[in-house]
């Protein structure tokens, strides 16, 4: 499906990052329009657009904004989540590199809607150049009164500050991000209370992803109904798909929600690299369950991907060809989660390391028949509400989906190990399965 | 300086200081940082960044000084500094090579890059060359998966790497 890009319309435009270039394509008109509206009307327009959170959870943005209590004596805060750390995801970086003012305008409109006068952009620490671009854009916008005190002569005041992260995947989770802004370790908070009621500095706070906020100026300018007409009924608008791995042309592609993964992989990306066979793909960032090649005709929208047994998540599509050893791939993913677990909840902290130990053992030819059962038990023990934040699920979903679709490879690796009885290899530490069983009983 | 008030993002030279003190520039930066938040504790991450820009790493002495300046205990500061992987609690080499080893990069050949770097530099992950020029570390996803394999050298991303172009990049870095 071809259509005019919306979020990536400035790609290829010379000096697209400058304020002058942004104004030429109608930039900051939506902000002027929004400020002339009642904040309630802005929220209603965004609700009507049906735009859902692009960071992974898919919660309707307008509804999130409407949760902020009115008439509190406390200030409210807007936070733009630019932590972008889900493996396979690199769309927010692209938006900042191509069109930083569009992101700022989205933040400004959202801030106006929830009556915030301070907004923070939480950007991952590695994005040094992207930080510089945002700093420059904020400074340009302030000089021309698109930000700062008395925006566009309306009396509305907003300061946007940048808060750099420092290398922690977990800080992409909104309550961990809030803790991190407060100067603490990024440990997620129990919800409720939700950030809309008690967020940063104990005040009502809305946290939105960069891409979600980038949709907002377009929604205000062209109307919620216009946006809602793109995509599918419940997954509206366009989505940025970040395709990586074994494709001819990896990169960020914009397409309406509901575009099939076949179109994304074969048409946009030129198919699997070197003409090889597709083996599997992860549709929504590394935490989303892996899907085998035969699900390639799944439309990429929240409902269809869920129906196919995975999640649209952040739209990070990781493509694997027929050369990929699935035991190796799962070991790689578990290495990530074991490293990034914040350590707050036992099932996640211990479970991610434990699962990694087991998969590593299988891959080194020391697997045992009971290992698959052990992995499944760990996945049950650390997911579905057993942890404060979804990182528990994030490492369990790869385990269960890899076993579901490619369990044969794990069984083969284990069978090979038992035949060879490899005594010359050092035996990796193995924890007692009995202890896991007992822990599981206590946990339930 | 910029109005938005982030830091001048430059490559720091690594210094080992026993009793770090904040000079006028740093003091004015800290005051600007504090203005961005209603609570002084929130300044901790940006102030640690400021110190790392100035001294190249975060020593125990720096943590004490930061704690004193922001009215936080040294233990609290250390707890935060050690949580985030980008705060360097040991002095790095002049060039910090951070190799992304997460899935998308691995699918596109990072292991070859890793082997090549280890052999060329004669060091393993977490080590610094004897001349103090290079520190090699493996990092988790850098968020540039479409241009894999990716290595971050100090503040810059180097993408779509091959062993050959990596050699050219390393040779092109100053002494």
Image: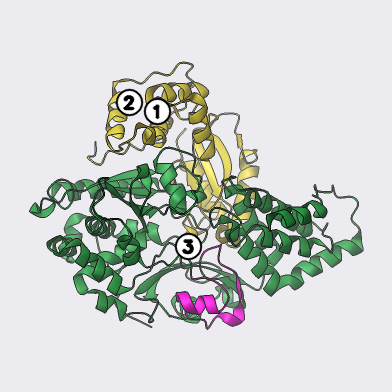
Chain colours: A green, B yellow
Cα distance between the residues tagged 1 and 3 = 33 Å
Disc 3 on helix, strand or loop?
helix
User: Is B88 in the magenta?
Assistant: no
Q: Residue A39 location, x and y as percent?
A: 20, 61
Closer to us: A170 or A238: A170
The chain identifier of the residue carrying mark 2 reads: B
Residue at mark 1 shares a chain with residue at mark 2 = yes
Residue at mark 3 shares a chain with residue at mark 2 = yes
Discs 3, 2 touching: Cβ within 8 Å: no
Closer to us: A273 or A194: A194
The chain identifier of the residue carrying mark 3 reads: B
The chain identifier of the residue carrying mark 1 reads: B
Q: Which residue is mark 3?
A: B146
Q: Assign the magenta stretch its main secondary structure.
A: loop
Discs 1, 2 touching: Cβ within 8 Å: yes
Disc 2 on helix, strand or loop?
helix
User: Of the residues under marks 1 and 2, which one precedes in the sequence?
Assistant: 2
Q: Which residue is mark 1?
A: B54
Q: Quadrant of residue A380?
A: bottom right
Cα distance between the residues tagged 3 and 2 = 38 Å
- Tell me, yes or no, if residue A159 can be seen here: yes
Residue sitting farthest toward the left = A153
Disc 1 on helix, strand or loop?
helix
Alpha-carbon neighbours of circle 2 within 10 Å: few (<14), some, or many (≥20)? some
Q: Residue A35 location, x and y as percent?
A: 15, 60
Closer to us: A85 or A219: A219
Viewer-side label of 1, 2 = 2
Magenta-tinted stretch: A285-312
């Amino acid at each position: 499906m071809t259509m005019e890009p919306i979020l990536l319309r400035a790609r290829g435009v010379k000096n697209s990052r400058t304020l002058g270039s942004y104004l030429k394509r109608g930039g900051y008109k939506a902000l002027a329009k929004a400020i002339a509206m009642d904040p309630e009307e802005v929220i209603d327009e965004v609700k009507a657009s049906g735009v859902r959170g692009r960071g992974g959870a898919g919660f309707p943005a307008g509804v999130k904004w409407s949760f902020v209590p009115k008439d509190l004596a406390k200030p409210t805060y807007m936070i733009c989540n630019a932590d972008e750390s889900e493996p396979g995801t690199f769309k927010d970086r692209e938006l900042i590199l191509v069109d930083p003012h569009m992101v700022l305008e989205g933040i400004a409109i959202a801030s106006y809607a929830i009556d915030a006068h301070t907004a923070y952009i939480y950007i991952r620490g590695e994005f040094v150049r992207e930080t510089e671009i945002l700093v420059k854009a904020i400074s340009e916008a302030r000089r021309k009164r698109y930000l700062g005190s008395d925006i566009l002569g309306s009396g509305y005041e907003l300061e946007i500050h940048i808060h750099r992260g420092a290398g922690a995947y977990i800080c992409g989770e909104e309550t961990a991000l809030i803790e991190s802004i407060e100067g603490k370790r990024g440990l997620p908070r129990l919800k409720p209370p939700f950030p809309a009621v008690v967020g940063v500095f104990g005040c009502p706070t809305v946290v939105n992803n960069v891409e979600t906020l980038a949709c907002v100026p377009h929604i205000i300018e062209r109307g919620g109904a216009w946006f809602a007409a793109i995509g599918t009924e419940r997954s509206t608008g366009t989505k940025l798909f970040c395709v990586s791995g074994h494709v001819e042309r990896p990169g960020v592609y914009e397409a309406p929600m509901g575009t099939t993964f076949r179109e994304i992989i074969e048409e946009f990306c030129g198919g699997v690299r070197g003409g090889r066979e597709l083996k599997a793909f992860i549709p929504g960032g590394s935490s989303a369950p892996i899907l085998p090649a035969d699900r390639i005709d799944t439309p990429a929208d929240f409902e269809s991907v869920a129906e196919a047994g995975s999640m649209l998540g952040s739209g990070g599509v990781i493509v694997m060809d027929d050369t990929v050893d699935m035991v190796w791939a799962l070991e790689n993913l578990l290495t990530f989660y074991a490293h990034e677990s914040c350590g707050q909840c036992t099932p996640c902290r211990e479970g991610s390391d434990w699962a990694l130990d087991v998969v590593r053992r299988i891959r080194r030819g020391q697997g045992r028949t009971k290992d698959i059962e052990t992995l499944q038990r760990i996945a049950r023990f650390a997911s579905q509400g057993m942890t404060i934040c979804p990182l528990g699920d994030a490492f369990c979903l790869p385990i269960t989906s890899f076993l579901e679709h490619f369990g044969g490879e794990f069984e083969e690796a284990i069978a090979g190990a038992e035949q060879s009885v490899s005594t010359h290899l050092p035996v990796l530490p193995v924890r007692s399965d009995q202890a896991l069983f007992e822990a599981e009983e206590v946990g339930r | 300086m910029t109005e938005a008030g982030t830091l001048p993002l430059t490559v720091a030279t690594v210094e080992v200081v026993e009793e770090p003190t904040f000079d006028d520039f740093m003091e004015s930066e800290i005051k600007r940082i504090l203005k961005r938040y209603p609570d002084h504790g929130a300044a901790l991450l940006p102030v640690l960044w400021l110190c790392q820009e100035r001294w190249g790493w975060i020593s125990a002495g720096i943590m004490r000084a930061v704690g004193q300046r922001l009215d936080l205990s040294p233990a609290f500061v250390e707890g935060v500094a050690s949580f985030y992987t980008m705060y360097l609690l040991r002095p790095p080499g002049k060039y910090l090579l951070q190799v992304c080893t997460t899935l998308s990069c691995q699918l596109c050949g990072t292991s070859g890059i890793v082997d090549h770097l280890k052999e060329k530099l004669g060091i393993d992950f977490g080590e610094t060359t004897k001349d103090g020029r290079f520190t090699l570390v493996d990092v988790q996803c850098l968020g540039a998966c479409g241009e894999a394999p990716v290595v971050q050298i100090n503040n810059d991303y180097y993408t779509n790497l091959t062993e050959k172009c990596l050699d050219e990049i390393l040779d092109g870095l100053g002494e």
